Amino acid sequence: MGYKTIIGLEIHVELMTKTKIFCSCANNFGGEANTQCCPVCLGLPGSLPILNKSVLEYGIKAGIAFNSQIANKTKMDRKNYFYPDLVKGFQISQDDIPLCSGGYVEIELEEGTKKIRLERIHIEEDTGKSVHTEEGDSLLDYNRSGVPLIEVVTKPDMNTPEEAQLFLEKLRSTLKYIEVSDCKMEEGSLRCDVNINVVDTETGNKTKITELKNLNSFRAAVKAMEYEEKRHISLLEEGKDTVKETRRWDEVKNETIVMRQKGEAADYRYAVDADVPPIEVKEEWIEEIKKSLPELPHDKKERFIKEYDLPEYDAGVLTQSKELSLFYEETVKYSEDPKQVSNWIMGDVLRRLKDEEIEIEDLKFTPKDLADLIKLINDGKISNNIGKKVLKWMFETGKNPEEIVKEKGLIQISDEDELKEIVEKVLSENEQSVIDYKNGKDRALGFIVGQVMKATRGKANPQMVNKMVSTMLNER
């Protein structure tokens, strides 16, 4: 018996406009509760919304980046439903004529590229925020009310939680590249809802769709999808009827919890918002926006492969984020070895960024500093192992590598006479290893080389040491 999982996503993305979607209130995260709102945000009688042109521009940017068709004529609609922090009793959104229709995002799988189709991208306003206290009270903060959003709705084209994660990562990367959102899930500027169900591929029986809400990280989204996938398969195996419902992920219990039965679109009683005039988007403006877009991740990846002769994998990693790609290219400006720069960034730099839980833009040192470190190694002034230690100190202090090398006395020993004297001393102190080597035990060579490096505190030129130890052993 086989099963096929069907996954569609709805992603709400807060836009980085200076002001909110329908008023001049600041669009900033945080701030004292209810200090960034006005009669329009609060939906007070007599207040009139005026659409922020930048919201349209940002929505169009996203549509172009994701290969969507931009509507030349569109409108805003009222979506009616009850929610404690929905102050007007309706949300100004878009129904049947979204700003952007269709489109797709390509993800890379082991078996090749897969195209995830988009249903639509539309603009809308965010709601307020409920704050629940330990005493059991619920407070309302309207600072977020009226913050501009785009909602990206996919077709149900994903078949595993891993595919959904790859899609989300590609989406976030692209949105950050075009600078329409900072996509900080911890601040709520990117929020993901999942629609998931499972089909029995032999009988055609399928479970009803479950909507997963309030997923505040990609990790939580993947875990929730994995849980639901197993739950839906169990329901099919047990022959149980399923219910179309909304569930949330409980991080403590590691399971999904029922919130409510899922409503239908008709329940929202969509109606045209008469306070916001119809919107006309001219082709000339769309073309202007298209020309203003920066190089997108896929295009940059292809360029890195051609321009820097990088493997596809390297180029993919280095273009995952705009900041990382900029750091790489800036480093390459000062270095003659693009592949070695790639190796250092993808290896030690990214590993330490992950360990210290910081971003590439938070580094204390500059791209030129990293290029200087690589040059010190290439020039034979320090060994690769010493270079790793110097990088650690660069992370901690932000100092230039040459300054660190001088302070710590780390200049590599490449003087032949000095090295010969050290090797002679090590050989005389390790006669048994010399005998072992003569008896065909090749591991003895590595041991003696290690002892020389230890005696020089890692400062000896490793290539010279290997060659010298081998020569002097064979001469004995």
Image (cartoon, helix red, strand yellow):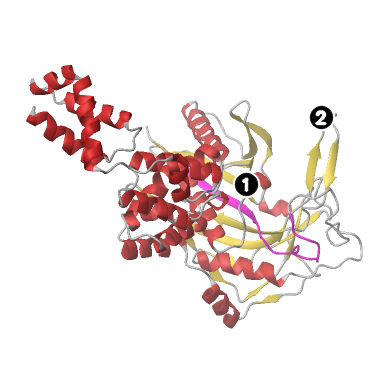
At mark 2, the secondary structure is loop
Residue 185: numbered disc? 1
Q: Earlier in the sequence, mark 1 or mark 2?
A: 2
The correct choice, above or below, for 51 with respect to 225 in the image is: below
- Residue 57 horizontal/vertical position (percent): 63, 71
Q: CA distance from mark 1 to mark 2?
A: 24 Å
Residue sitting nearer the eye, 213 or 365: 365
**Mark 2 highlights which residue?**
134
Question: Looking at the picture, how far across and down is residue 456, in whole percent?
Answer: 32, 33
Crowding around mark 1 (Cα neighbors within 10 Å: few <14, some 14 to 19, many 20+) is some
Please provide the residue range marked out in magenta: 5-28
Q: Residue at x 60, y 79 (%)?
A: 285
Q: Position of residue 155 (x, y in %)?
A: 51, 54
Q: Is residue 57 left or right of residue 35?
A: left
Q: Say which amino acid is labelled 1.
A: Met
436 in magenta: no
Amino acid type, mark 2: Glu
Residue 462 position by quadrant: top left
